[in-house]
Image (cartoon, rainbow, N blue to C red):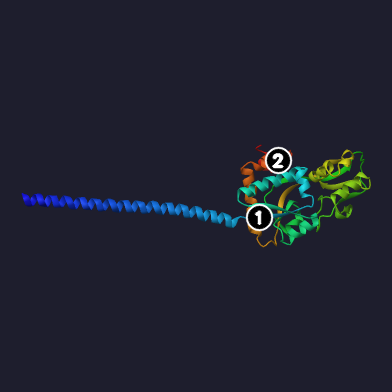
């Protein structure tokens, strides 16, 4: 009996030791798993932050010499899109920068691949030869400005030379236009009665007539009867060394600004007519 008691006590002691060892092992296993999970999460967060910082870009867009004036004096669709794009890019960790120059020079910088894109660029057929375009960011109306007392038929048509084979209006042959160096000069000639009709975009013309050419406003009107609507984009040169990456960043920023409501809010704030909004957005607002 004493031997059996001793044996039983010994077995109980062994079981106790074994149970203690198992508890220690289980504790170590779960502690290791918890540490591994925490380490993996921390490592993932660190990698994500590092990747975000590594991918952060400054997108530099070519703009006209009066870029700042157009923002401050509300060239409506221009300012709305600049603000929406800037917010979309900033949410993604990127920055938006303007490089201002006379329009012809600004376009040349983009064509050569020295700058990331041209803001804002109408989708003209011949521009496809040198540019790829972002998703649509709006629409602009092109047509004729005339004097308030204009009586048809027109004898002298004027417009700005766009370069290459592009036309201000598709149905006006280049040889019918008197080319002027700037929109300001064209509207000045129109106001003086030296030309009968001046072809340009409605939005930019209205901006000029309410700012630096406001003295002409009462004498000049836009005639929508023979106008054309063109989609607006950011043009990226096919020669840009990182063309695919730039287009991808810009398109994601455009989509993000719409998804977050930045685009719609900017359009409403700047009183852009809904016919000039991206169609899919205008239809649900």
Percent position of residue 159, x then y:
86, 51
Q: Position of residue 163 (x, y in %)?
A: 81, 57
Question: In this orientation, which residue lies closer to the viewer: 137 or 1?
Answer: 1
| The one of 18 and 105 positioned closer to us in this rendering | 18
- Which residue extends farthest left? 1
Are the residues tagged 1 and 2 within 8 Å (C-beta)?
Answer: no
**Mark 1: few, some, or many residues within 10 Å (few <14, many ≥20)?**
some
The CA span between labels 1 and 2 is 24 Å
Please name the residue shown 33% across and 53% down the image: 29
Alpha-carbon neighbours of circle 2 within 10 Å: few (<14), some, or many (≥20)?
many
Q: Quadrant of residue 263?
A: top right
Residue under circle 2?
A: 267
144 left or right of 71 in image: right
Quadrant location of the C terminus in the rendered image? top right
- Left or right: where does residue 215 sit relative to residue 279? right
Q: Is residue 197 left or right of residue 1?
A: right
What residue appears at the point 42 percent right and 52 percent down from the top-left corner? 37
Say whether residue 21 is visible. yes
The residue where tag 1 is placed is 58
Q: Which residue is painted at 13% across and 50% down in the image?
A: 9
Q: Secondary structure at mark 2?
A: helix
User: x%, y% of residue 53?
Assistant: 58, 55
Name above or below for residue 177 compared with residue 73.
below
Closer to the N terminus: mark 1 or mark 2?
A: 1
Q: Tell me if residue 228 can be seen.
A: no
């Amino acid at each position: 009996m004493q031997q059996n008691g001793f044996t039983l006590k010994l077995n109980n002691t062994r079981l106790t030791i074994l149970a203690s060892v198992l508890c220690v092992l289980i504790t170590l296993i779960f502690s290791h798993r918890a540490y591994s999970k925490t380490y993996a999460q921390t490592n993932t967060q660190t990698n994500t932050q590092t990747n975000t910082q590594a991918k952060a870009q400054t997108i530099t867009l070519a703009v006209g010499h009066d870029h700042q004036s157009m923002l401050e004096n509300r060239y409506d669709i221009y300012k709305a899109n600049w603000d929406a794009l800037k917010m979309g890019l900033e949410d993604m960790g990127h920055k938006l920068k303007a490089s201002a120059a006379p329009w012809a020079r600004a376009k040349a910088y983009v064509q050569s691949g020295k700058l990331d894109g041209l803001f804002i660029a109408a989708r003209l057929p011949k521009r496809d030869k040198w540019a790829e375009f972002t998703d649509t960011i709006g629409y602009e109306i092109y047509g004729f400005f005339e004097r308030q007392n204009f009586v048809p038929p027109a004898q002298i048509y004027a417009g700005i030379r766009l370069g290459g084979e592009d036309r201000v209006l598709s149905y006006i042959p280049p040889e019918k236009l008197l080319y002027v160096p700037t929109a300001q000069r064209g509207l000045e000639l129109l106001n003086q009665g030296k030309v009968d009709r001046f072809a340009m975009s409605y939005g930019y013309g209205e901006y000029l007539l309410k700012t630096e050419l406001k003295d002409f406003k009462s004498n000049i009107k836009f005639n929508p009867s023979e106008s054309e609507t063109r989609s607006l984009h950011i043009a990226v040169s096919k020669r840009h060394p990182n063309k695919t990456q730039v287009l991808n960043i810009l398109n994601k920023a455009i989509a993000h600004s719409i998804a977050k409501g930045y685009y719609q809010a900017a359009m409403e704030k700047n009183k852009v007519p809904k016919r000039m909004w991206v169609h899919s957005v205008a239809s649900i607002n």
